[in-house]
Amino acid sequence: MKKLIGCILILAVAASSLSLFAEEPQIAFRIFDDYVQEKQERAQRDKIGGGIAGIVTGAVLLGGGAAVWFFGDQAYPAMFDGAALNPGLKIGLTAGLGIGGGLSMIGGIDRLAKPTKDLRLQYASVYQEEDPAVQEALAAATLMGMSNKARTQRVVSAITRLSVATLTVAITIGANIASSGSYSWNSNISDALLSQVWMISGAIGSIFSKSQDELLYDKYLNTKDIFYSSGKSKKDKE
């Protein structure tokens, strides 16, 4: 009788554990897996697009080099008021375009030939975990790590851009002061700032715009909160 009661209790605990597990889906892992699949597909597209672009660019540069070598003597005078093409310039342009075109083509072919990196191997610790609960925890930790790394990179990028802009203005002021009165200390500061407008706007964008990895982790946290809050409200109603 005691054994029977013990077996019943064990089955009851197991059943409750299974039901509890069934109510807790792998939210982090699903979001993480979708991200990896999307990134894998994008890497394949980028590989093909980048490889083709390198080959096409290389072909254009090689064609330009060939055009300079074979037709430069005739085309140059027509373009520059009858001036003859300098032999040194001809050789330099042909060599530069030829080397650049050859390197571009080799790079494009090499990119197409290399296999696309399997991201599942990069995140093998997540994908190879057989315990769903542990796998969910690993996926959540990976999402958090990606988010923290992306946030750090974003902040460092903003600081670097602002530092470059500040240094440019500081050098301008220093040059004005060193001019021994030829310029006032604030001369050309507006021009210096204008030259750094892209740096400053990029820094502002880095500060206020979250990266994809940060948004992905936010999505996980929001989804988890909504899921558990909706589940708690259902239990309260029951």
Image: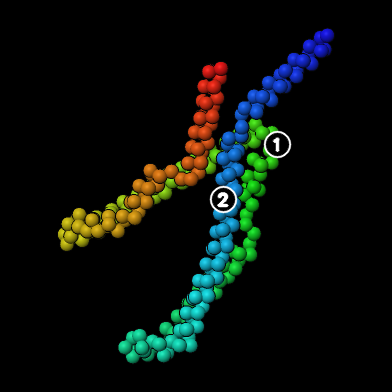
Q: CA distance from mark 2 to mark 1?
A: 23 Å
Quadrant location of the N terminus in the rendered image: top right
Nearest the eye: 4 or 181: 4
* Residue sticking out furthest to the front: 238
Residue drawn at the location 35% of the way across and 54% of the way down: 199
**Picture quarter containing residue 139?**
top right
Q: Secondary structure at mark 1?
A: loop
Residue where numbered disc 2 is placed: 39
Residue drawn at the location 60% of the way across and 38% of the way down: 29
Residue drawn at the location 53% of the way across and 36% of the way down: 220
Residue where numbered disc 1 is placed: 130
Q: Assess disc 1: are there few (<14), some (14-19) or many (≥20) residues with their C-alpha within 10 Å of its C-alpha.
A: few
**Picture quarter containing residue 181?**
bottom left
**What amino acid type should be assigned to the residue bearing mark 2?**
Lys
**What amino acid type should be assigned to the residue bearing mark 1?**
Glu
Q: Is residue 228 above or below residue 117?
A: above
The x and y percentages for residue 183 are 18, 60
Quadrant location of the C terminus in the rendered image: top right
